[in-house]
Image (spheres, rainbow, N blue to C red):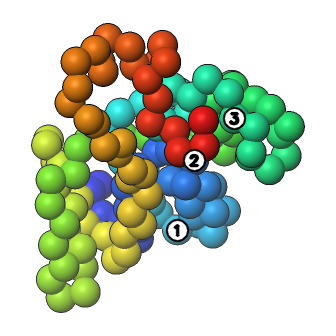
Amino acid sequence: MANEFDVIVIGAGIAGISAAIYLKRSSLSFLLLDKGMVGGKLNYIHKIDNYPGFSSIAGIELSLSLQRQMKQLNIESTYGEVNKIEKKDNIFQVRTDSDTYKCKATILASGSSEQRLGIKGEKEFFGKGVSYCATC
């Protein structure tokens, strides 16, 4: 069936893409799902100084590099926001806003979300002095 996979990876950020690369090499059938852009938060990070293999790299540059690697390996990402995951008879049912998928295993790589403060000017000054980076 078209909507049945060995594994569903939820999240197409760096962790989800890494999982997809390993799954591709293992020849397991998989689906890479994300509700946003491939690369996740990397697309919004100005500069990364603590990623192995790079002394410094722009987040978008790393994201584009991951996307090139995905293309080389013929890995695609499917848009969808996961609303529910249920396990029944050792099969996971993953429901998104537009589809339902089945798989034997799931990998949750959905990342994190910052804790907004809700103060005046927070949205207006995000990226212009307001940051949610723990090490910035």
Position of 24 with respect to 114 (left or right) is: right
Count the labels in the image. Answer: 3
Q: How far is mark 1 from mark 2, CA to CA?
A: 20 Å
Q: Which is closer to the viewer, label 1 or label 3? A: 3
Task: In this rendered view, identify the residue nearer to me: 97 or 56.
Answer: 56
The residue located at (34%, 77%) in the rendering is 104
At label 1, counting other C-alpha atoms closer than 10 Å, the crowd grade (few under 14, some 14-19, many 20 or more) is few
Task: Give the SS element for disc 2.
Answer: helix
Task: In this rendered view, identify the residue nearer to me: 126 or 97.
Answer: 126
Specify the quadrant that holds the N terminus. Answer: bottom left
Q: What residue did someone put label 1 on?
A: 28
Examine the image and state in which quarter residue 5 appears. Answer: bottom left
The residue located at (39%, 50%) in the rendering is 112
Q: Position of residue 62 (x, y in %)?
A: 68, 33
Position of 118 with respect to 28 (left or right) is: left
Q: What residue did someone put label 2 on?
A: 14
The amino acid pointed to by label 3 is Ile
Q: How far is mark 1 from mark 3, CA to CA?
A: 32 Å
Q: What residue did someone put label 3 on?
A: 48
Pick out the residue farthest to the front. 120
The amino acid pointed to by label 2 is Ile
Visible in this render: residue 36? yes
Visible in this render: residue 65? no
The residue located at (39%, 63%) in the rendering is 108
The amino acid pointed to by label 1 is Leu
At label 3, counting other C-alpha atoms closer than 10 Å, the crowd grade (few under 14, some 14-19, many 20 or more) is some
Q: Position of residue 14 (x, y in %)?
A: 57, 47
Name which of mark 1 and mark 2 comes first in the sequence.
2
Q: Which is closer to the viewer, label 2 or label 3? A: 3
The residue located at (50%, 53%) in the rendering is 16
